[in-house]
Amino acid sequence: MSTLQFTLFFVALLAGYVLVHLRVARFEEHLRQLSLLKDMDQKLAALEERVRALATAVAPEERARVSDQLDRLHDDLEDLREAARGVGEAVVQIPAVRPEPGQASGGASARAPSTEIVSVVEARLLQLGYRNLRLLGDLRGVQLTDEVEIQVEAERNGMPCKGRVIAHNGSVSDVHMQTVAQSFP
């Protein structure tokens, strides 16, 4: 056997030894992790025994009392959820209080029809979630019984919107609003 063949054989033998050694080291690590799992299994079994002991130590009457209290708490939370839902609907549906045409508002002076229309339109748009309202157009000389179309600029959820609101008989009859993003292609 030549020196070159012996060297190649020795290098191959050495590489095989290194590979086997790495595999054995990985296997030892795996066995170490499995032993940790065994310890965990023993701890869980001990915990289960403690829970069983606690369950038998607590009187059945006490468990029934705690269960009844939890049921009552659940029912109270359901009632609270329904009440909160009702309050939310009531807040959204609060009607705007408007004096009848010809009645004095605030006790002393009658409101102008244009002021009444502006307040009704602003209230409706605020209820719909629009902010930073700007009513465009001239409302001088309009009456509550007239059908009035008002151009509006506002913001909703941070997005500028434009559109029109139609008011008739002192209330809003139609709202057409679009975001600026929808207006331009």
Image: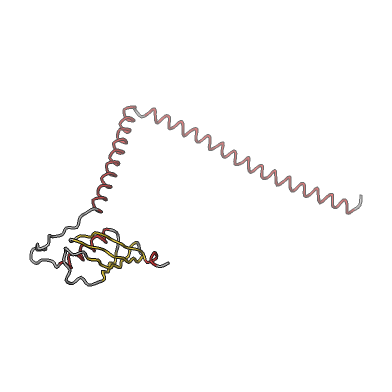
**Does residue 13 appear left or right of residue 38 in this picture?**
right
What x and y, as percent, mark residue 140?
Answer: 18, 72
Quarter of the image with the C terminus is bottom left
Q: Residue furthest left?
A: 108
- Corner quadrant of residue 55: top left
**Does residue 153 appear left or right of residue 146 in this picture?**
right
**Does residue 133 appear left or right of residue 110 in this picture?**
right
- Corner quadrant of residue 105: bottom left
Q: How many marks?
A: 0
In the image, residue 180 sits, relative to residue 128, either above or below, namely: below
What x and y, as percent, mark residue 174?
Answer: 26, 60
What x and y, as percent, mark residue 155?
Answer: 32, 65
Q: Nearer the viewer, residue 97 or 18?
A: 97
What x and y, as percent, mark residue 98?
Answer: 15, 59
**Does residue 37 appear left or right of residue 159 in this picture?**
right
- Corner quadrant of residue 165: bottom left
Q: Residue at x 89, y 53 (%)?
A: 3
Q: Residue furthest right?
A: 1
Colouring chosen for the image of the structure: secondary structure
Q: Residue at x 56, y 38 (%)?
A: 37
Q: Nearer the viewer, residue 82 or 103?
A: 103
Q: Nearer the viewer, residue 19 or 138?
A: 138
In the image, residue 21 sits, relative to residue 133, either above or below, namely: above
Q: Residue at x 22, y 72 (%)?
A: 138
